[in-house]
Image (cartoon, rainbow, N blue to C red):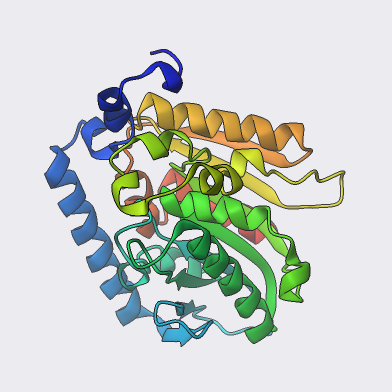
Amino acid sequence: MGKWQEMTKEELDTQYSPSKWSPRLGEDAVIKAFEQTVSEGTQKAQAATQTLLNVPYGLGEGEKLDVYLPKVHSETFPLVLFIHGGYWQSLSKDISGFAAEPLVTHGIALAAVGYDVAPKGQLEGMVKQVRCSVAFAVQQYTGISGVYLLGHSAGAHLAAMVLSTDWAEFGVVPNIKGAFLVSGIYDLEPIMHTYANDILRMSWEVAQENSPVRCVPKLEGKGNCQVLIAVAQHDSPEFHRQSQEYFQALGSAGWSASLLDIGNTDHFDVVEKLNQEDYLLTQVILKMILRG
């Protein structure tokens, strides 16, 4: 497969349709199964943990967090902010607590971040909202020992944009110790030429300014943030390329980054399985956080 610029719209639509690449289930079935699995996982997590639901981090209706608290309370605890996917136009925080149980068992809090998806929300607004949620969390919960970002698909894009934030305008510098970016998109330009942009209506300028691969801050040895870029074996070649290029861009700018290709997974179960403590990616996340 050549460069994305040489692909037809049909080819690009296929490359950026994750459900077409799953060997487990058909296109519609894999999406339906995903929504059911994460919904049930979230209900289970809410029944098993202490939660603070719909905590407002801003004034907008969609600007809310669902917080899952550690089982054993201590003065300080790590916080994982989970940013859901859905191509910036579907899904919600309400079914995004499914990864909480293995974390809270180990004294780690999880907050599922709500943001205004399209068509109500515009892409640059979503980036701002997610940045605001991070600033709010560290000001609200003073016992946070470190912030970790966990984003899937479009959520991995938003989490990556948090890494390029100029925190001066927020009046706070969060101690972001790690980011786990799962099956993400880091260059928005190809998306402009796919069906996904029918609702997003991204301009070229917006795509350029909000592409993580184009705005990686130079670290110059100051930061201690570890970035893990994970991609599913059965993600499309374009998703693999995007992950590889963002990994290289981080490395060139002095970041500590690693790239993990997770076998026997597709775009959906690569993140669904985070409700299982013995799953490879869960183990990698727990090890990184507990190492502190």
The spot of residue 44 in percent (x, y) is 28, 73
The structure residue drawn at horizontal position 69% and vertical position 38%, both measured from the top left corner, is 250
Residue 172 picture quarter: bottom right
Q: Is residue 186 above or below residue 62?
A: above
Q: Could you say which is closer to the camera, residue 177 or residue 151?
A: 151
Q: Quadrant of the C terminus?
A: bottom right
Q: Is residue 72 visible?
A: yes
76 sits left or right of 188 in the view: right
Q: Quadrant of the N terminus?
A: top left
Q: Is residue 149 above or below residue 62?
A: above
The spot of residue 278 in percent (x, y) is 41, 51
Residue 169 picture quarter: bottom right
The spot of residue 29 in percent (x, y) is 12, 46
Q: Residue furthest top?
A: 2
Q: Is residue 131 above or below residue 254?
A: below
The structure residue drawn at horizontal position 18% and vertical position 45%, both measured from the top left corner, is 30
The spot of residue 186 in percent (x, y) is 53, 40
218 sits left or right of 8 in the view: right
Q: Is residue 52 visible?
A: no
Residue 114 picture quarter: bottom left
Q: Could you say which is closer to the camera, residue 35 or residue 37?
A: 35
285 sits left or right of 215 in the view: left
The structure residue drawn at horizontal position 79% and vertical position 38%, both measured from the top left corner, is 254
271 sits left or right of 113 in the view: left
Q: How many marks?
A: 0
The structure residue drawn at horizontal position 35% and vertical position 65%, both measured from the top left corner, is 98
